[in-house]
Image: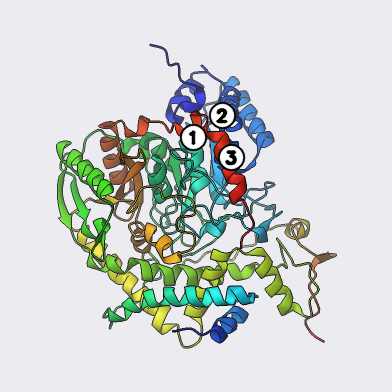
Amino acid sequence: MSDTRELYDQTAHELSDLLSTKQVSAREVLDSVWNRITAVDEALHAYILLTRDVAEQQAREVDERRAKGEALPAMAGVPIALKDIYCTKGIETTCCSKILRGFVPPYDAGVIERCRRHGLVFLGKTNMDEFAMGSSTENSSRGVTHNPWDMERVPGGSSGGSVAAVTASEAIVAMGTDTGGSIRQPASFCGVVGLKPTYGRVSRYGVIAFASSLDQVGPITKDVRDCALMLNVLAGHDPRDSTSIDAPTPDYTKSLLPDVKGLRVGLVKEFMEYQGVGVDAEVAAAVRAAVGRLEELGATCDEVSLPYLNYSIPVYYIIAPAEASSNLARYDGVQYGHRTRQPIADIIEMYRKTRDEGFGSEVKRRIMLGTYALSAGYYDAYYLKASQVRTLIRRDFDRAFEDHDILVGPVSPTVAFRLGEKTEDPVAMYLSDVCTISVNMGGLPGMSVPCGFSSEGLPIGLHIVGKPLGEETMLRAAYAYEQSTDFHRRKAVSILTGEGRRCAVVREQRRSPDP
Amino acid sequence: MLLTPEEVEHVALLARLELTDEERERFTSQLNSILEHFEQLRAVDTSGVPPMSHAIAMANVLREDEPAPSLSPEDALQNAPDRSDDCFRVPRVIE
């Protein structure tokens, strides 16, 4: 039976097969995805910048090289959406902050060089919480992005634009960053696959820094095979990032075996209930069903307790803002980005007015928190104490991995919440990352794989966590599980039912300037 | 209350931020509720526990000190809000 799906609806590995056998051209794939963007992005607002000229040039090069008979990498000709956080030579990069409006990087990030080398086609930059600080993409200076499954809900964050783009087939694959869950939580909210690699597995050279001991770059894809293909593109040592791990990179597609026989799986108690408060019943049920499925497939599963995970939120919200307050000191209106036009008496006032005008509320709040936590007299009580508890969290993980190959649980305690629901309550917003942030603190790899839907039809993600550099085992479990379900094949429909126009109006109303 | 509005103003100066009266009030209340949330860490016994700053145990990463190409002055200055020849220009710092 011939495949009647549009090109934009296909996965990267399906398109790779069609491209390499010359059944379609990179230009045809690009045109199909572009038509899709034109049809739905006004309503969804996944993108904040489209780079049609760059994409056409890249697609043309791929087609020309293929016509000459060159052997090209697997992902050559596949269109990708990029979070607005990677330096891209000649393409504006703002982290969705007013303070970086107009910044055109003079060089490419390490991961962007890799994407170019592999022939990926750059569709544009996607929306995100300003400087990746947020869990809903509502903290962007560029308006909100909608969840393709329900236009009144958030896509999650901070990589919400990248995830919404893949979910709505406005991109075949996308890249995000994950400091406390910013790839996995939106992937869970939107029902796609998102992977945060081991800290140091992927280069952060040229990636705008948020919290340097936690940040990692990773892929967002329609299925697990695409995720492995993207990890093949991204993973590897980069001497320009001193935290980059100099270890061999396997071919991750070799891990995609439909078999988990003998795999030891631990369901993490503290992922299911944080400080005694359980995750939503539907989320818990979907996760327990997924564990049951892994057992049917041959894994052995038991419950495991990591008690120090109950301190994840306070530890994270000391460490991340402290590092952010230091990283964001560079935005001072001198070398790039916004500088105040108000009259100023001295350079300190220039800094203060520039930063007041350039940063949004959540960024200011975290800079304040981090500055306070690092200020004289408080360092021991906050940053040092949090870094010690971080060690205890990592030891809990190490102990659990003595007799488990992977750990699992929910990605987020709830399904996607409503736009505006948590914007006035920072702590409530922070709690939506309660299952993911401990994984960043441990430096471990983690991913979200679709594992069901709520009664309202909203996606639920299974959280799989691996040992350091345990991406292969994690991918193997994810693949075996995914292939035994059809959750990843279901498509978001709300944007196809004519609701889009109404929601586009809602978006305009919400696009008021930051209070 | 852990943090007074005056302390919030002092932190804003350290952070090179300028707050409106409304922001100072809002941040004082929000930062206090966040700091209260942090209080639970005091209960954790961390005596003798080393702080963790990196996820993977790595010694200092060194490389040979070899010259390599870098950005041209033009590329480095292309995003400057204000420049003068090959320099970034800022308000007078020394009277």
Q: Which mark is residue A168?
A: 1
The answer to whether residue A173 is seen in the rendering is yes
Which residue has dot 2 on it? Answer: A36
Identity of the amino acid at label 1? Answer: Ala
Q: Secondary structure at mark 1?
A: loop
Q: Secondary structure at mark 3?
A: helix
Q: Residue at x 76, y 60 (%)?
A: B77
- Residue A322 horizontal/vertical position (percent): 49, 72
Residue A307 vs A403, above or below: the answer is below
Q: Gap in Å between the C-alphas at discs 3 and 1?
A: 15 Å
Q: Residues within 10 Å of mark 2 (few under 14, many from 20)?
A: some
Q: Which sits earlier in the primary sequence, circle 1 or circle 2?
A: 2
Decide: few, some or many residues near mark 1? Use Cα within 10 Å; few <14, some 14-19, many ≥20.
many
Q: Which residue is mark 3?
A: A504
Question: Which percent across, then down, holds residue A23?
Answer: 51, 16
The residue mark sitting in front, 3 or 2, is 3
The answer to whether the residue labelled 1 contacts the one labelled 2, judged by CB atoms less than 8 Å apart, is yes
Q: Are marks 3 and 2 on the same chain?
A: yes
Badge 1 and badge 2 in a common chain: yes
- Viewer-closest of B9 and A481: B9
**Residue most extreme to the top:** A1
Q: How many marks?
A: 3
Q: Chain of mark 3?
A: A
